[in-house]
Image: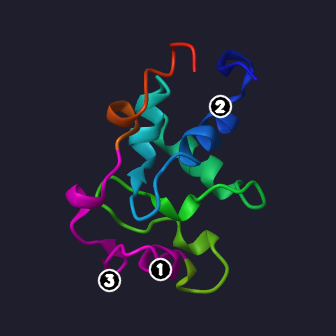
Amino acid sequence: MKPETLNFFEKVYQVSKQIPHGRVTSYGAIAKYLGAARSARMVGYAMNGSTGKDVPAHRVVNRNGLLTGKQHFEGTNLMQQLLESEGVVVINNQIQDLKKVFWDPSNELKSYNSDQ
C-alpha cells in the first residue's frame, strides 16, 4: 500500500513497527516524522487504538520519557514490564537514559514523503 493511501493512524502504526527492540520514541517524534508536528496527541490516540495490530505501543512515550500511556495496557505495570524485558530502565514511570535509548524516526528512516 502506498503511503498516501494510508490514514494517519495506519501511518503511525507503520512507523511504530520499525522502533527497534530496546529503544523508545515519542508521540511528538512520530508526528514530526509524518509531517504533522502538532499532532502528538493524535499519535497517542493511535497508540491507544493499536490493540491487536501487532504494534509495539509500549515503545512510545512522551517527550520527557514518561510512560503516559501505561493506563491503556492490561495490568498496572505491563508497559514498564515490556520495556524492562527489552533492557530499558524505568524508574518511577520514567525512562532512564532517554537520550541513549531514544530512536528518532526523522533520523533513522528515510523521509516519509519519499517512496518507501
Q: Nearer the viewer, mark 3 or mark 1?
A: 1
SS under mark 1 = helix
Q: Which residue is mark 3?
A: 92
Disc 2 target residue: 8
Report the number of discs. 3
x, y (%) of residue 33?
A: 43, 30
Q: Is residue 32 above or below residue 112?
A: below
Give the CA separation, mark 3 to mark 2.
31 Å
Mark 2 crowdedness (10 Å alpha carbons): few <14, some 14-19, many ≥20: some
Q: Residue at x 74, y 19 (%)?
A: 5
* Span of residues in magenta: 79-103
Q: Is residue 37 above or below residue 103?
A: above
Q: Secondary structure at mark 3?
A: loop
From the viewer's side, name the closer residue of 29 and 105: 105
Q: Which mark is residue 105?
A: none
Residue 98 part of the magenta-drawn span: yes
Pointer 1 residue: 85
Compared with 73, 47 (above or below) is: above
Is residue 91 inside the magenta stretch? yes
Q: Residue furthest top?
A: 114
Mark 3 or mark 2: which comes first in sequence? Answer: 2
